[in-house]
Amino acid sequence: MSDASVIERLRAAGCVFAEEEAEMLLAAASGAAELDLMVERRAAGLPLEHIVGWAEFDGLRIEVDGGVFVPRRRTEFLVGHAVELARPGAVCVDLCCGSGAAGAVLRERVRGAEVHASDIEPAAVRCARRNVEPRGGRVYEGDLFAPLPAELRGRVEILVANVPYVPTEEIGLLPPEARDHEPHVTLDGGPDGLDVLRRVAAEAPEWLAPGGHLLVETSERQAELAAETVRKVSGDLLVPEVITSEEWWATVVVATRR
Ligand SMILES: C[S@@+](CC[C@H](N)C(=O)[O-])C[C@H]1O[C@@H](n2cnc3c(N)ncnc32)[C@H](O)[C@@H]1O
């Protein structure tokens, strides 16, 4: 199959960035038969990252298996802010880590950071282990804070938690790549999108060191309610601030432990 015919097939399937995607598929395929299969899968709507097996995140190549949430470029805003807040050697936790993209960046960008990451989905944990552990972090499987080592209580300086935040009824409105190929546990934030955040913010004060930060991504529409929820469910122990980036089209609640 020629480069032009790959582009043509992708374009016909509605891929907006057909040229760039074709380039990635051509580089990833080991031969004509594999390329044909990859183009077919992409035309059928599979996320490009699941087909090639990786996503670019903050300049890193993050491995992403099928069924694992694809790290979004806008989350670089949250992670970049976490990196700015972290002092060398900081104890960092990437909760709901998915592929472990945030944990991998923290290990790469914060000198001597002690990074722990966890997720409830076995597929995500397997993937995060390949992205975080070779860089010197640790990855655990389980519900929110439950699998973390107990000795981290009260010592966490940076707690990154890109939790699911799509309101259940809006999942059907997401692009098919997300709706059909990412497990709903990675997206579904309950009726108002804040269910997982409530649980994280209620428990976070026990794990954060005084002055430590919880960083969570949210939508612009949910931001004020998310910040107020964090303050309330933490019993006023977390002081939230909303920060936004027009460049990344991203909104993040940064809450600081009193
Ligand atoms: C929106 S994805 C974000 C993944 C990753 N942090 C990123 O930014 O690419 C949310 C992740 O939360 C995980 N998750 C959902 N509920 C969870 C729970 N109760 N405990 C731990 N992880 C959970 C999902 O498996 C999914 O990987």
Image (cartoon, rainbow, N blue to C red):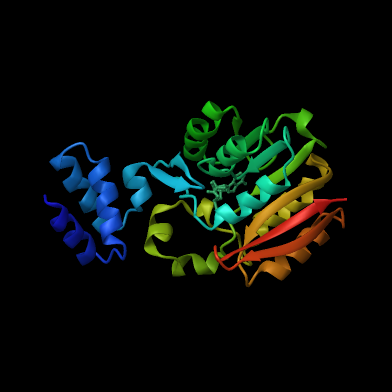
Q: Nearer the viewer, residue 253 or 248?
A: 248
Q: Nearer the viewer, residue 64 or 8?
A: 8
Q: Relative to residue 186, is residue 91 depicted above or below?
A: above
Q: Residue furthest bottom?
A: 221
Residue 111 quadrant:
top right
Tag count in the figure? 0
Q: Residue at x 40, y 41 (%)?
A: 65
Residue 17 quadrant:
bottom left
Residue 197 is situated, as x and y percent measured from the top left of the image, at 68, 55
Determine whether, in the image, residue 1 is placed left or right of residue 96.
left
Task: Judge whether residue 252 can be spotted in this image.
Answer: yes
Q: Relative to residue 232, is residue 123 depicted above or below?
A: above
Determine whether, in the image, residue 39 is placed left or right of residue 156.
left
Residue 206 is situated, as x and y percent measured from the top left of the image, at 82, 42
Q: Residue at x 66, y 52 (%)?
A: 81
Residue 11 is situated, as x and y percent measured from the top left of the image, at 22, 64
Q: Residue at x 42, y 60 (%)?
A: 179
Residue 66 is situated, as x and y percent measured from the top left of the image, at 38, 44
Task: Judge whether residue 141 can be spotted in this image.
Answer: no
Determine whether, in the image, residue 24 is placed left or right of residue 161.
left
Q: Residue at x 53, y 56 (%)?
A: 187
Q: Relative to residue 167, is residue 41 depicted above or below?
A: above
